[in-house]
Image (cartoon, rainbow, N blue to C red):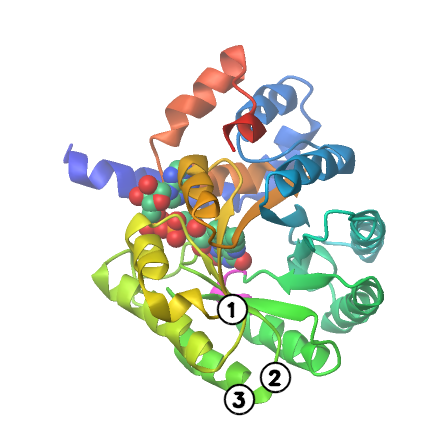
Amino acid sequence: MNDSLTEPTFANALKSVARNLKLKTYVQQSNELYPLLLRAAERFVTGDDMEQGLRCRETLNAQGYRTSLEYIGENTMTEAACLLAFQEFSRLIDACSNDRSGAGTRISLDLSHIGLSVDANLTYKHLVQLARQAAERGLEIVISMEESSKTDAILAIYRKTAAQFPNVGITLQAQLPRSLDDLQEILAAGSGFIRIVKGAYQEKEGDYIPRSGTLTSRYLQLVDLCVQAGRQVSVATHDERILLHIISNKMYRNSAVELEMLYGIRPDLSKQFKDLGFPTRIYLTYGEEWFLYLCHRIAEYPPNIYDAITRSIQGGTDTAAQY
Ligand code: FDA
């Protein structure tokens, strides 16, 4: 076997496994697999209930990090389950509004968690209620970007909501060529903040820009467009070259740029940049639907499989302590 093909093949296989709803349900319902794999997921996920997410957020806020917090989930398939997810986000907003640190936690969510896979109007109704509640409590909501088959629907709901609630932001994936046009439209239309990511989803060959110098250039182009437009932008990546470019370039220092990294990935870099005085946000997650999230984190960086297996067997160190 050609070794240079092994990692990408493994990563693609894992991304397909992540999308397998039957397997996800099987893991969630298995008394043996759930606790075993949760130990592996706990490197990236604060735990399976809200209290664990809130505790971790407090610890990181106290150390000077900004935080985002997501109740993990996507592709909720019934109206009743979407309502439950909506209610959990509503409780989360209330819990975060007692934020005495002034760090302003951002609530992150997938629209398919609160209705998009059932009915676009249901998602819109839920999102508007959450946006209003968050605005009343001085909090922001950021919408994640899911696979490209959902991009049009996500952007349509975002535009309608952001026109009324500037506390609602959007994530764009640099790996999708269309994001350049989408961003220009968004910049022309409103005032809310934007998060730029490379993109985690497996797309059809030819429909996306793979990890490469071309993708790095496109990523920086999107960030620069936000900066030139005076928009708040989260540079959400662990790519050291991009991050060093941002922190070493004066142009970004006086702008509304922040760095944002996923909990459990490169805490050393997050700490270094935060200690240098660059606004640094850590993206925290909690909830029972961590399976897809864990698969994505391993697919992005296949050597993580060793850590996942070790943690499953013998547990691991507390991720929060690494910040
Ligand atoms: P890249 O994948 O090129 O990795 C660069 C380097 O970072 C690697 O060489 C490695 O050193 C390190 N690294 C990256 N991933 C790692 C991992 N899992 N474990 C250990 N090291 C790792 N995606 C999406 O499609 N929709 C979304 O809404 C979001 N939202 C989001 C929010 C935030 C705050 C972040 C940081 C990321 C996302 N993502 C996302 C995920 C994103 O698209 C992307 O898949 C990951 O950030 C990994 O890509 P990088 O930009 O880090 O670069």
Magenta residues, as a range?
A: 146-150
Residue at left 57%, top 47%? 283
Q: Position of residue 125 (x, y in %)?
A: 81, 71
Residue sitting at x 79%, y 71%: 128
Q: Which residue is label 3 attached to?
A: 188
Q: Are marks 3 and 2 in contact (CB under 8 Å)?
A: no
Q: Is 89 located above or below residue 223 in the figure?
A: above
Q: Above or below — where is 51 with respect to 141?
A: above
Which amino acid type corresponds to the residue marked 1 in the rendered image?
Ala
Question: In the image, what residue type sits under mark 3?
Answer: Ala
For the residue pair 51 and 60, the one nearer the viewer reads as 60
- Element class at badge 3: helix
Secondary-structure class at tag 2: loop
Q: Is residue 14 visible?
A: no
Whole-percent x and y of residue 143? Answer: 62, 63
Q: Which residue is mark 1?
A: 256
